Amino acid sequence: MEVELLEIRQHMGRFPPFEALSDDLLDEVVGSIDVAYYKAGEEILALDQELHHLCYVRSGAVEVFRRSGDLHNRLGEGDIFGQLSLLRHRRTRYPATAMEDTLLYFIPEEMFHRLCETDDVFADFVELQRPRLESAVEQHKKNNDMIVTRIRKLVTRYPVMVEASTTVQEAARQIGDFQASAVLVLDEPVDNPRYTFRDSEDRAWQVRGILTDSDFRTKVVAEGRPPETPVGDVVANRVIAVQSDESVHEAMLCMLRNNIHHLPVMHRRRPVGIVHLSDIIRYETQSSLYLVSNIFHQPNMEGLARLAPDISGAFVRMVEEGADSRMVGSALSTIGRSFTRRLLELAEDTLGPPPVPYCFMAMGSMARNEQSIVTDQDNALVLSDDFDPEQHDAYFLEMAKIVSDGLDACGYTYCKGDIMATNPQWRQPLATWKRYFSDWIDDPNPEHLLHSSIFFDLDTVHGENAMVEELQDLVADKASRSSLFLAAMARNALNRTPPLGFFRTFVMEKDGKHNNSINLKRRGTAPLTDLIRVHALACGSRAQNSFERLDDIDKTSLLAPGVSDRLRYALELMSMSRIRHQVIDLEHEQTPDNNIEPENVSSQERHNLKEAFQALSHAQKFLKFRYPLPSSRSR
Amino acid sequence: MTMLVPRRPQIPDWTAYLAQRAEHAQDARLARFFEAGTPSPDTPIRDVPMVALDMETTGLDARNHAIVSIGIVPFSLGRIQLSERRYWVVRPQRTLHAESVTFHHITHTDIEQAPELGDVLEDLLEALQGRLVVVHYRHIERLFLDDSVKARLGEGLMFPMIDTMAVEARFQRQTWLARFKRWVGRPPASIRLFDSRARYGLPAYQGHHALTDALATAELLQAQVAHHYEPEMPIGQLWT
């Protein structure tokens, strides 16, 4: 690289899509650019102007407008514009103006097309919408397939090390002082360069071996050796170690193969820690599978409440191992259902068998298998039609209380909207529920619409599943035939809209206003889930999970080809973004929430989220036209 | 009455000067350069092809120090053609003091292997020919070029230049407000390249490389014109 252009190269190399370019290609790009300065307010691109460059914002800020004059985007340092016109060989469709004093770099058209042809990441980045969302999701999956937990993750501190001439007594004292259970024995480098390293004083050492707790018992005390014996005489002259980037699994196999409980971990030739078999067992038990089986072994509510912190542990672990949003949502829902079921079992143990058959139902995210780490409880009881309030309600109220209090103790807070089985309105026989549901569909007033959007995500947690299935069938049959209800639900689904995107450290709204943070649930995943629910109801789908609902919608012609894929990718991206930010919160020992702060959003993530917001926004516009209000209330 | 007439800088008649030099030039390269002349002083800056020039020298005194590198970037008011940039490292005829070459990125080896200024003069003049040269602080570039060329060919090299430092001084040093501030004891605003650029929101480049500084100068002039002048501004009012 010519040194004089390093300045420009370093800048471009920090921003996507240039950050992913090979060094040679980036050098060529940098060598080909032209530059221009624009004063604040000055027009950069006029509508229908011919364009032969991709524009890169080196400093300042640029506003891009739609043909209509509406703000389309606001761009800052490192952003690009003009790619659309270049790709379509069209004149400028989105005019641009400098919002502040701005320095632009121009990448010539020929270079742009060459980048598109030679670099897939670049092509994906500048290509429009669906392909980009798709590639973003797939890129995430691909990256995570390669992630295996490395053994270094389990190393918490440096190993205790002694020289071979140290007495066994001194070595034993050091083990005690450091509360360790083994020491590494070092010697002058002799025969094994594989384990030879230099310490901070540049002295060369060779790892001779490891001396563990049990070695003191079997090799020192049992053999009657005096405390003055040098450790070098006791330690076996062999080292079994793993490299720090080996997988946990590999390390475990190594221990089993060699029948050892301590394993030195090396970074190249330098020892960085010692892992004990118990470290690996503890790590393995932090899985959601283990948590679920543990839940069912708890004898009482206190025991269950003690497991609450393990939920976030399992959550973080899952995300780090590369789970996608469906895996995370389904695992958290399973954990939540398990808590609920165990509480119901405990309630039945306390209260005796139920007087009439019942089914305990979950609503909302748990029913959809999309639960997040930030959640409250939404539940209800459907009772057999033999239910007699006088005789039986005391039992079920008590049961509902046990479950609701128990869930609260386990971290699933009480529902603020009182959607809980403790509320008599939501503790009713099947016939009453059927009447509720029919009324809501026939008369979609605001209160009924609110109920529909909660209760029409419905699933069994425990009990007589058949009753819930009857309710699900009723919704699927009746809702799809009521165009008034669908039109009302469609309008209801437009109450919450996504923002336009990000600009520097702000969330940018469609009217150009800025906010400091965004609630990604309220402004992203929830409106998208609402929207998918409307289409699912329209096509009579019995699925509860949003992705499965999209599969059902695909079997109809409700959406134009390709649209459902865009929605899938948008949901996955927004969900994963929310999940990743919750992991960040947990890692910083903060209470996780649904907010993301733009300064914590990488520029690639911003880009993807903006696309996802756009996909949602387009789908919302379509919803209104797809489900028009019927002219009369005949249906 | 005369007291109210603002002081105008004296503008040399560059067109006549270049024509006269073209007539008397001995060296063919210089003759070609002077014959190309310059756009007339009433040409709007919008229509003038320009070239930003920066050089690194072993010191500040043209008589005792030498040029070690030259960077040029052609540009117009609308666009800086960085892709057309040129850069030369040159070997000084005068001996280098070891301490004076503790430069930035140019090593002794670079300089030892570099061509002599006389060898790159043809390329340099060709790249400057027909373009209005823009520099930041003209006294270095003008004196060093004139002196070095005179030492080699017996005749010097002088041409009109826009000096972005002088332009900046007009707005930071010579306004009534600036004079008033100085009168009340405030330190004058810095008109160094780095500080001048910051006033226009231009990014901080790592300075002291002839090519980076030439690019920085071109950007600065674009910004100065955008902020203080119209694109119709005649170049005769900017050059010195």
Image (cartoon, coloured by chain):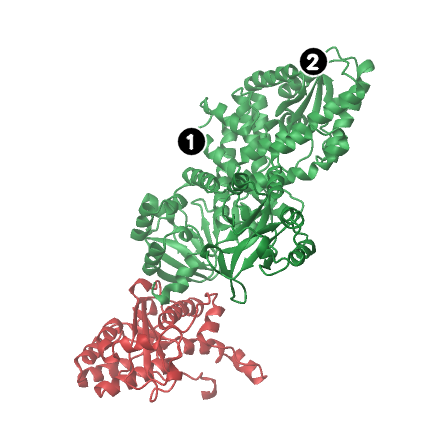
**Chain letter, colour green:** A
Q: Is residue A51 visible?
A: yes
Specify which label sits upstream in the sequence, 2 or 1.
2
Quick check: A543 left or right of B155?
Answer: right
Q: Within 10 Å of the Cα at label 2, are there few (<14), some (14-19), or many (20+) other Cα atoms?
A: some
Image: A492 above or below A253: above
Say which quadrant the N terminus of chain A sits in: bottom left
Colour seen for chain B: red
Which element type, helix, strand or loop, lies under badge 2? helix
Q: Which residue carries the number 1 mark? A: A562
**Same chain check for tags 2 and 1:** yes
Percent from the top left, x then y, of residue B15? Answer: 26, 80
Q: Amino acid at mark 2?
A: Ala
Give the number of callouts.
Answer: 2
The amino acid type, in three-letter code, at marker 1 is Gly
Q: Is residue A176 left or right of residue A571?
A: right
Label 1 marks a residue whose chain is A
| Residue closest to the far top | A386
Q: Position of residue A483 (x, y in %)?
A: 55, 21
The image quadrant of residue B55 is bottom left
Query: What residue would you read off at disc 2?
Result: A431
Up the image or down, A294 lies above or below B154; here it is above
**Residue B122 quadrant:** bottom left
Q: Which SS class for mark 1?
A: loop
Left or right, A337 with respect to A37, comes to right
In the image, is A159 to the left or to the right of B17? right
Please identify the quadrant where the C terminus of chain A is shown.
top right
